[in-house]
Image: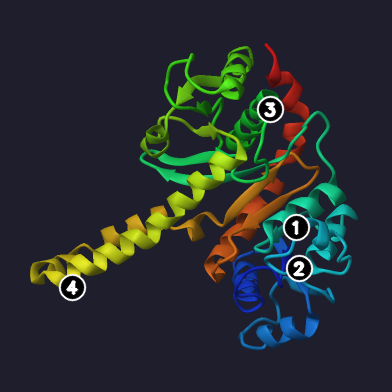
Amino acid sequence: MIKIALDAMGGDNAPHDVVHGGIEAARISKGRFEVVLVGDQNLIEKEIARHFRIIDLPFSIVHAADAVAMDAQPSQALKQKESSIAVAFRLHKDNNVSAVVSAGNTGAVMATALMQLKRIQSIRRPAIGMLVPSETGKTLLLDVGANVDSRPGDLLQFGIMGSIFYSHVFNKEQPSVGLLSVGHESVKGNEVTLKAHEMFRNSNINFIGNIEGGDIVRGNVDIVVCDGFVGNVLLKFAESFHGFFKANMRIFIRKYLFSKIGALLMKPTFEGIRKAFDYQEYGGAPLLGVQGYCIIAHGRSTPRAIKNAILAAHKTVVENVAGHILKGVEQLAIS
């Protein structure tokens, strides 16, 4: 059975929401995976005691005496050898688990993953990918924060890793890849994107050219490539729409009587829209380019988000995404 380490102490509402999400994932495992809760054993057991019918569920506990603060610097976190993040990745490094899920300090998770798991050969900079909703389904955006400054070759590798991930996780041959820029024309962009565009054109991936921000939500492309600075700003902006939509719907429904009646009739539709824009439905962001599997969940993750992050981790392990990246990165780089 596949084992997935869950950082029980990572996140704004840890360990309560994290342990809850881990137990919910264990309930629907059906023999596919075991959840390994990593953190303060006493605190974890107190949270587990809140749940019923757990005797036969596939989960276990590994004690970690320390926890990384959400605002800690990555360098500081690396010194905490017995933190839940460090212990979880040691379990992965020693092949005691197949993946790590954490809603903790992103910088600490990144730094520890790189130290413990190392980069995939030929990958200079690992990237964090995030699934965002579009009119046609899901779009993978990367990088969304691992690399503030990127070289043209890094952007090409992001596109290659994203293409491999998307093709195996969503069973789509040759998913389309677009380079985020200030215009569709190949002559538009800064020095990095102009050079990256040329490299993409000479690669073997399904590169459709430059795209603009509006192409993401229209679903005109499967994978969107940008540096981590732009990607993180874009992601945080997109995440705000879920709360913005809910708040405005409440205002208009309360304001008009017929809106209240219509809201009752439209409840299933609203629920569908809510799910499409809710980050919790996507679980977390895969860290691509390391020799292993890591899903980075949102710091404010609810139990549902943690559960979905564990399911996402299981999917990447089953599909052997890291193995395919190792084999495919040089094959796809240059035609």
Give the Cα distance between marks 2 and 1: 8 Å
Q: Residue furthest front?
A: 190
Task: Kindly tell me whether residue 78 is visible in this rendering.
Answer: yes
Q: Secondary structure at mark 4?
A: helix
Which residue is labeled 2 in the image?
68
Query: How dense is the environment of label 3, judged by Cα within 10 Å: few (below 14), some, or many (20 and up)?
Result: some
Going 86% across and 60% down the picture, which residue do you hit? Answer: 91
Query: Considering the numbered disc 1 on the image, is that residue within a helix, a strand or a loop?
Result: helix
The local secondary structure at tag 3 comes to loop
**First of labels 4, 3 by sequence position:** 3
The quadrant in which the N terminus is found is bottom right
**Which quadrant of the figure has residue 153?**
top right
Mark 4: few, some, or many residues within 10 Å (few <14, many ≥20)? few
Q: In the visual, does 105 lie left or right of 243? A: right
Q: Which residue is mark 3?
A: 151
Residue pointed to by mark 1? 108
Give the x, y percent position of residue 223: 53, 33
Report the amino acid beneath label 2: Val
* Amino acid type of the residue that numbered disc 1 sits on in the rendered structure: Ala
How would you rate the neighbour count of disc 1 (Cα within 10 Å): few for under 14, some for 14-19, many for 20 or more?
A: many
Mark 2 Cα within 10 Å, few/some/many (few <14, many 20+)? many
Q: CA distance from mark 1 to mark 4?
A: 44 Å
